[in-house]
Amino acid sequence: MLDSGDPFVRFKGVQKSYDGETLVVKDLNLDIAAGEFVTMLGPSGSGKTTCLMMLAGFETATHGDIELGGRPINNIPPHKRGIGMVFQNYALFPHMTVAENLAFPLKVRNLAASEVEDKVHKILDMVQMRVFADRKPAQLSGGQQQRIALARALVFEPDLVLMDEPLGALDKQLREHMQYEIKHIHESLGVTVVYVTHDQSEALTMSNRIAVFDDGVIQQLADPVTLYEKPENAFVAQFIGENNRLGGTIKEIKKDVATVALESGDVVKALAINTEGKGTRSMLSIRPERCVVSLKKTAGLSSLKGQILELIYLGDHIRCRMKVAGDDQFIVKVPNTADQLGLKIGAETYVGWRTDDCRALDFRND
């Protein structure tokens, strides 16, 4: 029985191995509240889809427990879990019309014909597809098919909907439109959603919280703002958004501020977030939009000499690739203002940032 305040979905010490030797999911502990939109984000092979499939019942946990609504579901078959599923390939029945596809999960639950019709019309209106009710899936565009797949997952009013890369087959513009549409539907219905993607911008746009997976482990679990602004390790900093990395050695740490000697010989200060102390290697993380390009050192900023190698005009900002501290892939996003349009390729400048915007993290060589 689910008590007030208890998680709606719970993974407790869950592990998964396909061959009995290698763990693709390692000791997963994750609580998801009712009504949350939680995204499992990570590269291919990180374990995120396996976690979703275990929750759906299509895979069995090697160890640990999965609970839904306060009850263990490890031994409950998929069709008895009452979970809605949306897949990348839509998985619509090609021989059925849109209305018949949506009616199917209601009929197998033995709802009365009048109730089936009412729920189908209601969900078609929600996804703005009422006029397509009599068409077959092959007569719909990819975006329209995805709307119907979403509607089918919602039509029987499940408490939990799982989505596995549902927008992966759509073009960029339609994918972005569908992100907002799914977000708004979630907000209006209050259904719990667990979403899997490798697209970090998709995760940032839609989620209440994001679990970043790598090598079968959640590297960080946080809301989108915290995840982007305050990554806890080098993997998260690099995987979420664009990120400049500078390797160095910790010289000292005072009041959570590390003094770091870079490989170029430059010395800068950074917030000591995930380091092993004096004398150890660290990877500094600085977001491109937090950097400032100037002709001279800027007071109050860590400033290093740089050379402009490439300028790309992107409308609202100029993407400036520079050589900084020996790194020729250092990116600065320069706001498109009149005083910045004089930047020239080959120019020697300074690039600076606030200490609070630079994070000293664990060292990664990849």
Image (spheres, rainbow, N blue to C red):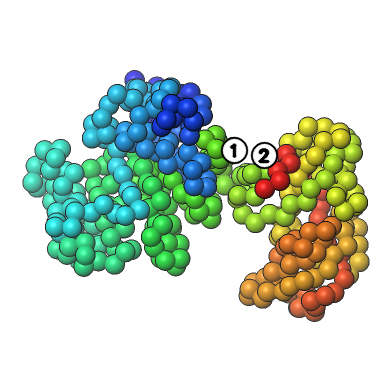
Write down the residue under mark 2: 232
Q: Which mark is residue 70?
A: none
The residue at the point 31 percent across, 36 percent down is 58
Q: Answer few, some or many: residues within 10 Å of disc 1's Cα (few below 14, many 20 plus, some between 14 and 19).
A: some
Label 2 environment density (alpha carbons within 10 Å; few <14, some 14–19, many ≥20): many
In this rendering, position of residue 336 left or right of residue 119: right
Q: Where does the image place residue 133, in percent across and percent down from the top left?
A: 17, 61
x and y, in percent, of residue 350 in the image = 86, 64
Quadrant occupied by the N terminus: top left
The residue to which callout 1 is attached is 220
Quote the CA–CA distance across marks 2 and 1.
7 Å
Q: Is residue 37 above or below residue 29?
A: below
Q: Is residue 262 left or right of residue 242?
A: right
**Amino acid on which the number 1 mark rests in the picture:** Gln
Q: SS at mark 2?
A: loop
Res 133 visible:
no
Residue 72 falls left or right of residue 118: right
Q: Earlier in the sequence, mark 2 or mark 1?
A: 1
Q: Quadrant of residue 7?
A: top left
Q: Is residue 303 left or right of residue 16?
A: right
- Residue at 67% from the left image edge and 40% from the top image edge: 233
Q: Are marks 2 and 1 in contact (CB under 8 Å)?
A: yes
* Residue 234 image position (x, y, % from top left): 68, 43
- Residue 291 makes an appearance in the image: yes
Front-lying residue, 213 or 71: 213
Q: What's the residue at 39%, 63% (across, down)? A: 170
Question: Is label 1 in a helix, a strand or a loop?
Answer: strand
As drawn, 164 above or below 7: below
Instruction: Give me the residue at 71% from left, 60% from top.
Output: 289
Extreme residue in the left direction: 113
The amino acid type, in three-letter code, at marker 2 is Glu
| Picture layout, residue 58 above or below residue 74 | below
